[in-house]
Image (cartoon, rainbow, N blue to C red):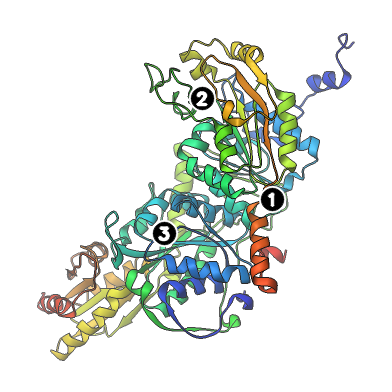
Amino acid sequence: MSPKGVPEAVIAAVSADEHPIAPFLRMDRMPHIWCSTCGIGTTVKALASAFEKVGTDLDKVAIVSGIGCTGRVAGYVKLDSFHSTHGRSVPFATGLKLANPELDVICFSGDGDLVAIGGNHFIHAARRNMDLKIICVNNFIYGMTGGQVAPTTPLTALTSTTPYGNAEPPFNLCHLAAACGANYVARWTALHVRRLTKTFAEMLVKPGFCFVEIITPCSTLYARKNRLGTGLDVMKYYHDNTVIEHGADPATTDIVFGGPIICGKFVERDRPTWLDYQDHYLGEKLGEKYQRGRMLQEACER
Amino acid sequence: MKADSEGVRTGIHYLDGDRAAAEGAIAAGCRFFAGYPITPSTESAEHISERFPQVGGIFIQMEDEIGSITAVIGAAWGGARSMTVTSGPGISLMMENIGLAAMLETPCVIANVQRGGPSTGLPTMVGQADVMQARWGSHGDYEIIAYAPESPQEAFDLTVKAFNMSERYRTPVIVLLDECVGHMVEKVTIPEADEIEIEPRRLTKAPIGEYLPYAYGEDLVPDMALAGMGYRFHVTGLTHDERGYPDMSEACQEWLVPRLLEKIRANADDIIQFVEEDTEGADVVVLSYGISARVSRLAIQMAREKGLKVGFLRLQAVWPFPEKRIAELAKQIRSFVVVEINLGQIFYEVQRCAAGQCETLLSPHAGGGVHRPENILKVIEKGAKAK
């Protein structure tokens, strides 16, 4: 007997022997290292659902991560996946994409990885409008190393290296990505699974540099140090304090400690990608002499 | 496999070493270059930026050297032969990800046109003080392959070889030019494409679902998959097992890291390359590489005119080091004289391998210029008197 009002599909999903996204994961690596109530898993699930929605050929997807809690995503997804060095997922992905433009290359990393140590790569890839999909799990803190201040930590927030409160203004990542030239910029929280999935589905088919920020709870460190309660309390906070404002000027979407979180799709535009520019200009300058990049001779022959 | 004729500029050219290395890369099938401008290496990048769009290559000038080497590694996994060229501070910035390339076993080539250091040092002037850095610049244990050309012709030849060795042993390979070799213009003969042997990438033939990224055979080198081939594999800079999965254990570290070293050490005879002249019956053997080898020749000639018996050992491969040959020669001669533009780097390697069987003397130079032959001669004369 199905409980009243619960759709059959939901019943089937929760009573199945296997999790619906298990085929997308390296189940031989479970259990994962993430804490309970962490938002990273939710983000992974949303991406898996988006792949299904779009009908992506998973043989042609590559995930590149840097270092940190979110950096471990590359190791759990059953795709071509590269766990690179701290901050370097974007340049690694740049090389991968340019060597084989057929691939959908997705960087899946945390805020510290992408915009602190990797900040220079991030802004330049956005400037070039490199055809990369950047998923940034922002938990306002360095999780893997024990809760140190990040370039995203809101002013006054407590971390293990700001025991008196953070006195540095943070980056607004969406504003940064948009100002540098990203083709697509959106923000959600880990609560907004349905909207996030839709955004990922849009991102997957959008050419150019796409940036999606997901505000996620880190109950083990950020929430505990700042007395924000459990992971569930943080989700409640997202529920009560999110303002959805599609098309908002990213400059107006700063995140302030204890303030509202403005979410939505902020930017969608059609700047030509790096490869588009190359093809266009070099094709024009060199005419028939221009040859677009191609792979290894022996790989082409297979 | 033979070189792709489209990329090979067969004929006689007048090229500087930087451009000759670039032509060597193109001939070897390199089709991805990521770099950052830095003197005295920039001519390579400029040359490639002009050539690549006409041979199906991708050139990108990155935001820094860290991005450059990382993009080069990414491109290798995407299916390109890839390289970067740099110098001084740039090679220091690349060290983090040269370690990643060694750990992931990524074929790629890094040319370092050495200038005077440390730090910003002498941007436009010669040095050879990055030799030990080439070997151990990144943290952790690994072995490296490094070649040191003495001329633009050799910059071409050894860059082709560097690519081939990087593919055969799945490892980053460093081409250690120096500012003099990089900037000197000489005749470079580029052979016909079908005279250039190219090492194919060791692509796996395993059925989908059965591929283990780090399973290896007798030669200790695993076969490689590329992104997009359908294997859905994982690789990580963390210590990993044969599936490529992280394994934070002493046992896995012991399984992995000694092999990274051993795949180079066990195959050293295949990789090592040197030129030996008149060592038979010599009292002194001058050992040098790169531009210093060319200056050494004049000093050797001067010494012979004085009646001294002097042989010459010129390293074309600096790493791995020709330990066996040094040890053999040490038993036959009075001394080695090591000539290098640093204050003693390869010198200590020679001393170690000679193991007290003969004297080892250094003819040092702090950088910014090449040795005066008479200074080398003085050391040779001292070496000839050694017991």
Nearer the viewer's eye, disc 1 or disc 2? 2
Tell which subunit mark 1 falls on: A
**Which residue sits at x=18%, y=88%?**
B304
In the picture, the quarter occupied by the N terminus of chain A is top right
Which residue, given by chain and number where applicable, does mark 3 sit on?
A: B144
Tell which subunit mark 3 falls on: B
Three-letter code, disc 2: Phe
Question: Along the polypeptide, which appears first: circle 1 or circle 2?
Answer: 1
* Disc 1 from disc 2: Cα separation: 31 Å
Q: Contact (CB < 8 A) between labels 1 and 3? A: no
Three-letter code, disc 1: Leu
Q: Contact (CB < 8 A) between labels 3 and 2? A: no
* Disc 3 from disc 2: Cα separation: 39 Å
Which residue, given by chain and number where applicable, does mark 1 sit on?
A: A103
Which residue, given by chain and number where applicable, does mark 2 sit on?
A: A140
Residue B311: quarter of image: bottom left
**Which residue sits at x=45%, y=23%?**
A147
